[in-house]
Amino acid sequence: MTIITMNHKKKLKFFLISVIFIAFGIVSAVFVGYRYISDKEDNLISNIRSKANISIGKAHQTATRNGITEWSLDAASVDYINDKNQAIFHDLSVKFFLKDKTNVYLKADRGILNTDSKNMKIFGNVVVENGSYRLKCDNLYYKHNGRMIYSDTSVSITGDLFNLVADSMSLDLNTNRSIFEGKVEGTLRERITL
């Protein structure tokens, strides 16, 4: 009988040692795998940042012409890439100053400013507000020389008295005039007072 118990003890001891080594191997593999994945994530972020000559958190920029402020921009962070003359803004908001003393407000996930021309490409949850009007689209462009905002993708505009959808649009900030093109659909409401 002692032979069977000794054999069981050896098997039990071998089994417990095997379980300990397997558990240690699993923990080691998970740790190494996690480090590998987190290093890849860090490498991806550092690759994006390595293209930038400078990266800044919380940025503010203003464009003026002949002493008159045309727009101001705020962002959660910005990456400057000197060889492309670009500033890439994250979580940005822009305030455009119009000649009639009103303002147009723009918010988006990201924007690219060409620092030499001051032209912008804005994309990701783009929202533009002017008084009681609100425009939503996927991307938007700003041409600084002509002070034009335009989109080549579908736009949706809502106001107190209308809803409008168009394939593309442009807004001249000098004249405050908008042009809608492509398939344009809308609903107009009338305000009646007695």
Image (cartoon, rainbow, N blue to C red):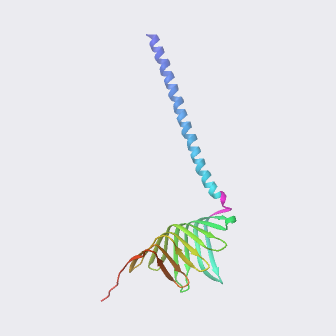
The residue at the point 52 percent across, 25 percent down is 17
Residue 51, horizontal then vertical, whole percent: 66, 59
Up the image or down, 46 lies above or below 136; here it is above
**Drawn side of residue 115 relative to residue 130, left or right:** right
The residue at the point 38 percent across, 81 percent down is 161
Magenta span contains residue 141: no
Quarter containing the N terminus: top left
Extreme residue toward the front, this view: 182
The residue at the point 55 percent across, 33 percent down is 25
Front in this rendered view, residue 73 or 112: 112
**Drawn side of residue 159 relative to residue 29, left or right:** left
Residue 50, horizontal then vertical, whole percent: 66, 57
Up the image or down, 99 lies above or below 128; here it is below
Residue 13, horizontal then vertical, whole percent: 50, 21
- Total count of labels: 0
Extreme residue toward the left, this view: 194
Q: Give the range drawn in magenta.
A: 50-56
Front in this rendered view, residue 180 or 133: 180
Front in this rendered view, residue 69 or 57: 69
Residue 156, horizontal then vertical, whole percent: 44, 73
Quarter of the rendering containing residue 114? bottom right
**Drawn side of residue 77 relative to residue 169, left or right:** right
Quarter containing the C terminus: bottom left
Magenta span contains residue 54: yes
